[in-house]
């Protein structure tokens, strides 16, 4: 049994972010490969990241973050979260960042996204989950589409990155769409 587990998947589990996660979170801001796809631009020290962690999970917050961990060795490989959780409108914004490029391409984003949709629709009772994804992130877009997200719009030249303006897709999934997808897959 995993002591600090919050949500469990096949190969991963999600848990609260702890002070010991500061190096992994700092890496997600500092690693050039991760920065390229997650659009971070300011370096962060491990000490500053510990300060940020200390401010998480305040009562009434509309931000619910998790560390994404491998079950095999309990190692944290990234962070996922719901932002702007609105329990009246039953909506939230989803994000994921795998901080270690070595963990890319192994299905961790797919599994994490599935766990988060289960949490959003079955635990938080959300009606809608949406996200913004850089138009050049083909792997991310494919992952989200396989999870059931639909392209809903385009944010033209929404951010400047490496000297160029970049478009972002708005993608969303509704509870009924997720439940239909679950029924079709036998889950």
Image: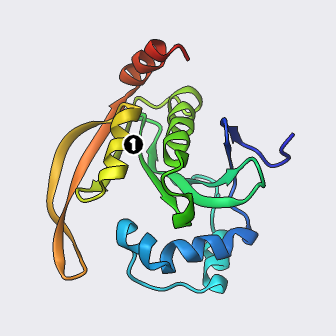
* Depicted 145 relative to depicted 106: above or below: above
Numbered label tally: 1
Q: Position of 90 compared to 74: left or right?
A: left
Q: Position of residue 11 (x, y in %)?
A: 67, 41
Q: Which residue is drawn at 50% across and 35% down?
A: 117
Give the percent coordinates (x, y) of residue 131: 35, 48
Residue at the image position 85 percent from the left and 47 percent from the top = 3
The secondary structure type at the circle numbered 1 is helix
Q: Give the answer, above or below, for where 104 lies relative to 117.
A: below
117 or 184: nearer the eye? Answer: 184
Q: Where is residue 123 in the image (x, y as percent from the top left)?
A: 59, 30
**5 or 185, nearer to the observer:** 185
Instruction: Pick the quarter of the image with the C terminus.
Output: top right
92 in relation to 173, above or below: below
Q: How is the image coloured?
A: rainbow
Q: Which residue is drawn at 39% across and 42% down?
A: 143
Q: Residues within 10 Å of mark 1 (few under 14, many from 20)?
A: some
Q: Quadrant of residue 79?
A: bottom right
State the residue at coordinates (49%, 76%): 29
Residue 65 x/y as whole percent: 58, 55
Can residue 89 be seen in this snapshot?
no
As drawn, is 8 to the left or to the right of 139?
A: right
Give the answer, above or below, for where 187 lies relative to 128: above
* Residue that mark 1 sits on: 143
Evaluate whether residue 98 shows in this view: yes
């Amino acid at each position: 049994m995993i002591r600090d587990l919050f949500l469990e998947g096949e190969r991963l589990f999600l848990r609260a972010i702890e002070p010991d996660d500061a190096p992994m979170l700092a890496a997600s801001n500092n690693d050039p490969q991760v920065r390229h796809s997650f659009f971070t631009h300011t370096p962060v020290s491990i000490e500053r990241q510990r300060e940020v962690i200390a401010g998480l999970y305040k009562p009434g917050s509309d931000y619910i973050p998790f560390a994404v961990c491998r079950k095999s060795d309990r190692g944290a490989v990234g962070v996922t979260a719901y932002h702007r959780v609105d329990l009246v409108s039953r909506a939230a914004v989803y994000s994921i960042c795998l901080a270690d490029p070595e963990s890319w391409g192994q299905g961790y984003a797919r599994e994490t996204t599935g766990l988060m949709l289960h949490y959003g629709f079955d635990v938080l009772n959300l009606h809608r989950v949406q996200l913004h994804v850089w138009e050049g992130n083909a792997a991310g877009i494919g992952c989200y589409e396989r999870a059931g997200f639909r392209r809903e719009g385009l944010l033209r030249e929404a951010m400047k990155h490496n000297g160029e303006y970049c478009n972002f897709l708005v993608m969303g999934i509704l509870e009924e769409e997720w439940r239909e997808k679950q029924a079709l897959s036998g889950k």
